[in-house]
Amino acid sequence: MKYAFNTSVGRVRPHNEDSGGIFLHPKGAVLAIVADGMGGHQAGDVASQMTSDILQQRWLATSELRKPTEIEQWIRESIEVVNETLFMHAKENRDCQGMGTTVVVAVCTNDFVSLGHVGDSRGYLLNRCGFQQKTSDHSLVNELVRTGQITVEQAEHHPRKNVLLRALGTEPTIKIDVETVDWEENDTIILCSDGLSNKVTDLEIEELLQTKGHSVNEKVDKLIKMANERGGEDNITVAIVHYTHDRQEQG
């Protein structure tokens, strides 16, 4: 597998409330994380960074996970631990009251990818069947689209587009969406915060991922550059994992 991660503060916001990374397990599987924090002061920074740190620590400390059911259970339990930790931290620290974060994670093995998410940070899969969003945004606007109250086109410019229906740290318990998909040689997983998906279309992401001659690092950086060139009003975070039988490496 080849993989790359990067994050940008964008062109408007004073600090970056996104966090995440890609972490190689000693037994070979890869964990990719994108978290988009929110909250007053710099509490969003705290929420997203705590999320990334806790998931990374649990990932590197766990024994080898072989079956999809085992990895899905690990994702659920780990995100539940994060949620409880954030909720208590906000309760005990006045500066962090109201903080929360989205999260999307992908555990990539040689046979399958297990995705888990809360919020509107997204996970996509590119394979021989095409390019597909594998996560469903936990947002007010997506719910309005799903129930037929507004169109996809209306959702693009809806005044309440940033309202989330689920986020980590805001309630003592959380519902987590988890799914496992098969993947094979040349398939690609991409995770991103809404700083990318609000500025770059799915078709544009797909076309860039299919561009020949660019490394995964270059593709990550090009996507972030596109979002910044279109205003960069939000923080932008992208993680790409490309399935190749070459040795595990960043790049």
Image: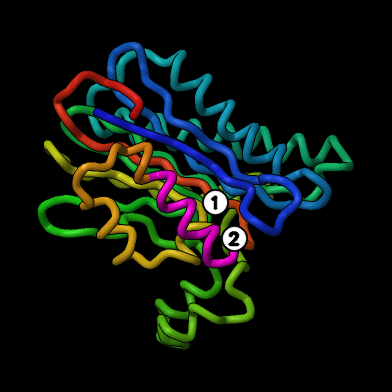
Please give the range of residues in magenta: 220-231
- Secondary structure mostly taken by the magenta-highlighted segment of the chain: helix
Give the colouring mode of the picture.
rainbow
- Position in image of residue 67 (x %, y %): 23, 27
Does residue 22 belong to the magenta stretch? Answer: no
Q: Secondary structure at mark 2?
A: loop
- Position in image of residue 159 (x %, y %): 63, 80
**What residue is shown at x 21% (from left), y 42% (from top)?**
213
Q: Is residue 19 visible?
A: yes
**What residue is shown at x 41% (from left), y 41% (from top)?**
239
Q: Is residue 171 visible?
A: no
Corner quadrant of residue 205: bottom left
- The quarter of the rendered structure image containing the N terminus is top left
Q: Three-letter amino acid code at disc 1?
A: Ile
**What residue is shown at x 29% (from left), y 32% (from top)?**
108
CA gap, disc 1 to disc 2? 8 Å
Name the front one of labels 1 and 2. Answer: 2
Q: Which residue bears the numbered disc 1?
A: 236
Q: Three-letter amino acid code at disc 2?
A: Gly
Q: Which residue bears the numbered disc 2?
A: 232
Q: Is residue 180 left or right of residue 92?
A: left
- The quarter of the rendered structure image containing the C terminus is top left
Does residue 225 belong to the magenta stretch? Answer: yes
Number of marks in the image?
2
**What residue is shown at x 50% (from left), y 59% (from top)?**
227
